[in-house]
């Protein structure tokens, strides 16, 4: 019997997708599913929903168990084969609000604040503090388990787990799966989707579509570049930042323009406010969207819980396919976040967490060699990696100086604020987050 533990099981919608996928798969029909959370109400709601799915698609064969609070965490993890991580330390309120409102006082505007930027740094520090506890428990009670991390900031969290714990870890993100399909569809090249060939490599949320060919091996990039330039010149749309990447750097990026607008010093600039409209950048939209999404999720969650006939169709989320491949030995390919050991990407450092194609089979997850990125793409990735490595150092050493350094080297923050204001802002953020952060010296 396979044991699957879900950390952050109160994430009802995501738990439905991942664990519903598992219960819809013959390989895991008789599995033990352990739900862990620190919120009793949300844990109970997810358990009700998953029990209905188990009964309706799996004849009730899976054993679903609940574990509440840190005092029961080891029991949730004990003997697990797979651990899925989907947590948000501090939630939208108060922590996401803090990560937006305090920087805004200093003139620093953000779009998402969960991957890079000062918001991404603070989220990493809050979350690594929790993941370290997960890791120590796993090393003791399920040392052979695979840790499937879905939590952002992906590169910093996965990099920490792989460098400073003994836990077998891979980071998983949706953006690689939908990258080329979204691009070709948006540019009117739907006829090229079938049996297309692609290579994606880089880092999470800034992986690069390095090659894209049709089924006959014809390079699609010349036409993509022509159409992307024309679209940016002739209309307003939601992907203008990434199309500008194509124009200026030659390649398309995996994550949305809304995310990428804040990952660099090019687009959100106090001195050039007209760029916000020119590139259709939704500044501060994310907090407003969170409020609406939370309300929508609550309604959707209540609908799911109240439906005794609830069923599930297996989704395209990587998690169940990875687990199935490891258990059965049948190979499967993913885009995974792993350490750059063995120079998977030759012109990025070995300690960097990179996103590359990976083969999964009965022996585990095997990252694939990509080679050298075009130098301009490696340089863009390094502006992130510099921050990743120093933020991880801050989390490990508990030195406040390293937080300052990570913030000073973050491209958007450095472009907008003075060193003195960066230090003041970091101090204010640390104070505001209180017990969600460990003590820094």
Image: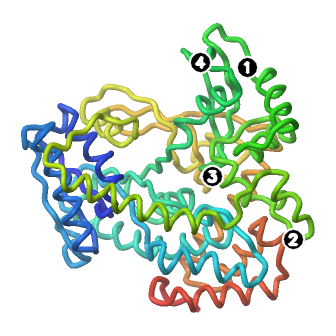
Which residue is painted at 48% across and 72% down in the image?
92
Q: Which residue is mark 2?
A: 270
- Please report contact status of discs 2 and 4: CB closer than 8 Å, yes or no: no
Callout 2: SS: loop
Instruction: Identify the residue at the far top of this view.
Output: 216
Q: Nearer the viewer, mark 2 or mark 1?
A: 2
- Above or below 320: residue 68: below
Mark 2–mark 1 Cα distance, whole angstroms, equals 37 Å
Q: Is residue 249 above or below residue 154?
A: above
User: How far apart, in angstroms, are the residues tagged by discs 4 and 3?
Assistant: 31 Å
Residue at screen point 66% across, 83% down: 102
Q: Sequence order check: which comes first, mark 2 or mark 3? A: 2
Q: Which residue is mark 1?
A: 220
Task: Tell which circle, 1 or 4, labels the residue nearer the N-terminal end.
Answer: 4
Discs 1, 4 touching: Cβ within 8 Å: yes
> Which callout, 4 or 3, points to the residue nearer the camera?
4
């Amino acid at each position: 019997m396979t044991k699957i533990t879900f950390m952050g099981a109160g994430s009802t919608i995501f738990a439905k997708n991942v664990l519903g996928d598992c219960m819809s798969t013959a390989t895991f029909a008789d599995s033990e599913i352990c739900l862990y959370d620190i919120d009793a109400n949300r844990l109970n709601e997810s358990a009700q929903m998953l029990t209905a799915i188990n009964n309706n698609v799996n004849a009730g064969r899976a054993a679903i168990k609940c574990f509440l609070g840190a005092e029961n965490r080891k029991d949730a993890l004990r003997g697990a084969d797979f651990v899925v991580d989907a947590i948000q330390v501090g939630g939208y309120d108060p922590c996401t609000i803090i990560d937006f409102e305090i920087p805004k006082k200093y003139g620093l505007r953000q779009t998402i604040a969960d991957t890079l930027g000062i918001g991404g740094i603070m989220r990493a520090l809050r979350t690594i503090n929790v993941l370290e506890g997960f890791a120590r428990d796993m090393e003791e009670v399920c040392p052979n388990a695979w840790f499937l991390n879905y939590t952002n900031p992906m590169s910093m969290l996965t990099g920490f787990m792989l460098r400073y714990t003994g836990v077998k870890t891979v980071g998983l993100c949706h953006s690689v799966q939908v990258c080329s399909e979204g691009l070709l569809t948006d540019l009117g090249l739907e006829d090229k989707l079938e049996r297309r060939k692609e290579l994606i490599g880089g880092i999470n949320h800034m992986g690069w579509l390095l090659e894209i060919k049709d089924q006959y091996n014809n390079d699609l990039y010349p036409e993509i570049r022509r159409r992307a330039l024309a679209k940016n010149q002739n209309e307003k749309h939601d992907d203008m930042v990434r199309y500008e990447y194509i124009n200026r750097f030659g390649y398309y990026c995996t994550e949305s323009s809304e995310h990428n607008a804040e990952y660099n010093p090019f687009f959100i600039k106090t001195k050039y406010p007209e760029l916000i409209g020119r590139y259709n950048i939704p500044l501060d939209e994310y907090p407003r969207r969170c409020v609406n999404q939370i309300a929508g999720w609550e309604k959707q969650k209540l609908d799911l819980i109240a439906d005794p006939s609830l069923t599930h169709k297996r989704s395209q989320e990587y998690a169940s396919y990875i687990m199935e491949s490891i258990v059965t030995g049948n190979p499967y390919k993913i885009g995974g976040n792993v350490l750059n050991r063995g120079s998977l990407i030759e012109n990025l450092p070995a300690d960097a967490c990179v996103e590359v194609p990976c083969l999964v089979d009965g022996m585990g997850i095997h990252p694939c060699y990509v080679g050298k990125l075009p130098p301009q793409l490696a340089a863009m990735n390094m502006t992130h990696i510099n921050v990743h490595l120093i933020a991880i150092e801050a989390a490990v050493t508990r030195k406040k100086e390293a937080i300052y350094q990570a913030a000073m080297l973050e491209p958007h923050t450095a472009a907008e604020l003075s060193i003195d204001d960066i230090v003041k802002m970091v101090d204010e953020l640390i104070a505001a987050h209180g017990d969600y952060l460990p003590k820094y010296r």
